[in-house]
Every structure is written in C-alpha cells, then in structure tokens.
Amino acid sequence: MPAESQLRLIFLAVTRKCPIRCEHCFEWDNLNQRETFTREQLVQIVDLYQRQGVNQIHFAGGEPLARLRDLIEVIVFARAKSDCYVVTSGFNLTWENALPLKIAGCKGVIVSIDHYLADRHDRFRHHAGIFDQAVAGVRASVEAGMVTAVSVCATREFIDGDHLIGDKVSETTSSAQIKVLININTTDASPG
Ligand code: SF4
C-alpha cells in the first residue's frame, strides 16, 4: 500500500460521559453509560493505531474532559508518535485543566461554539452556561499555549444571517484571536 494512502488520523472516543445534551448529537442513546474501555485498553488502542502509522489523534467522546485524568494519561502515552488534539464542548476546560493537558503533550484543543449569542448556543446544547464555559475554555487553551480552534455546527437556522464573527464574540474574546481560530479550524468536531 502506498504510504500516502495509509491511515494517518483517527478520532478516538475516550468516554461515554457527557453532561451536555446537544440537538445534533448522534450518541444520545449511548451517553452516560458504563465506559467501553479502561484506560489501559485506550492505551492499547492508541498503540495499535500508531503501529499502523497514525500520527494524529483527536480525542473525543462523549465529552473527553469528563474523563480528564485518564485522558491525560493516554495523551502522555500517545504524544511520542502522534499529535494529540482534544475535541470538546468546553465543559471542564478551565485554566486548571488546560495547563495539565498542555504539559501532558496535548497539541491542540477544538472547542464547539455554535452561535455568538450565549442563549442560542446554550439552547442548542441544552445546557445553561456552556457558552460561557466554551469561551473561557478557548481563553484557557490559548493561554496554556495550545493550538486552539473553534468548531461550528452550522445548522440551517444558524447560518441564516450574521453568525460567529459578531460583536458579541468580539466583546467576550479578542476579535483578532477569534478570526485566527476560525481560519485554522478544519475539523468536524461532532460529537463535541
Ligand atoms: S455532541 Fe458531544 S457534547 Fe454534545 S451531547 Fe453529544 S457527546 Fe455531548
């Protein structure tokens, strides 16, 4: 098999846990049940794929930051052979958690922000306050020194009119920063 056709990137769901209830989620029926894999098994899976040449891993869920301790341990293992990214709703992405992720070897974080109006975002995600957590999480990730991207779930309703690059976002983050984040975001982060 030619090298260029080898598997290079995987999304690995590290947990079934998630406190959010997004309208677009295709994992509702599987969420908040017993975990499928132990931490040791997750490491084995990473090792298996790395032996096949995977050099980029996106850790997702569920909400990966709901299983932070195990996530960090798996990243510590994975970092030697793969670039590690975390796909998150912003839940638990505080400065206190972003820094250990960075130290563990996490290269970047992809945060879901679907609308620049907090109530629209929170309503879509059925979780009061998750917009504020996501914005704070973006800041924490940037300050921790990780590549930081924003993922947008572009519903038919949300793309009808001005969307993420709006005055509200400019007020809550840095407008220069948010434009850079959008430009580097190439990932479909759902679930996340
Ligand atoms: S899309 Fe992600 S954050 Fe939303 S409910 Fe599903 S697993 Fe949770």
Image (spheres, rainbow, N blue to C red):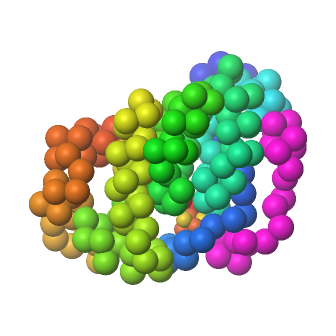
Q: Quick check: 36 above or below 24?
A: above
144 on left or right of 55:
left
For residue 58, side relative to residue 168 (left or right): right
Q: Is residue 102 highlighted in magenta?
A: no
Question: In this rendering, is residue 35 above or below 186?
Answer: below
Give me the residue at 62% from left, 36% from top.
Answer: 57
Which of the two residues, 111 or 186, is positioned nearer the viewer here?
111
| Left or right: 174 in relation to 79 | left
Quadrant housing residue 67: bottom right
Residue 148 image position (x, y, % from top left): 40, 40
Where ligand 1 lies, by image quadrant?
bottom right
Query: What residue occupies the far front of the structure in this picture?
Result: 96
Which residue appears farthest toward the left when viewing the image? 167
Q: Is residue 43 visible?
A: yes
Residue found 73% across the figure and 37% down from its top:
74
Query: How far from the left and from the top, in percent, is residue 70?
Result: 74, 45
> Is 42 colored magenta in this rendering?
yes
For the N terminus, which image quadrant? top right
> What is the quadrant of residue 101 in the picture?
top right
Task: Tell me what residue is drawn at x 52 percent, y 44 percent.
Answer: 96
Image coordinates of residue 3 in percent, x first then y, are 65, 19
Q: Image height check: is 153 above or below 40?
A: below
User: Looking at the picture, how far across and down is residue 64, in whole percent?
Assistant: 63, 53
Residue 186 visible: no
- Range of the magenta residues? 25-45
Left or right of residue 47, residue 4 in this image: left
Which of the pair 179/133 is nearer the observer?
133
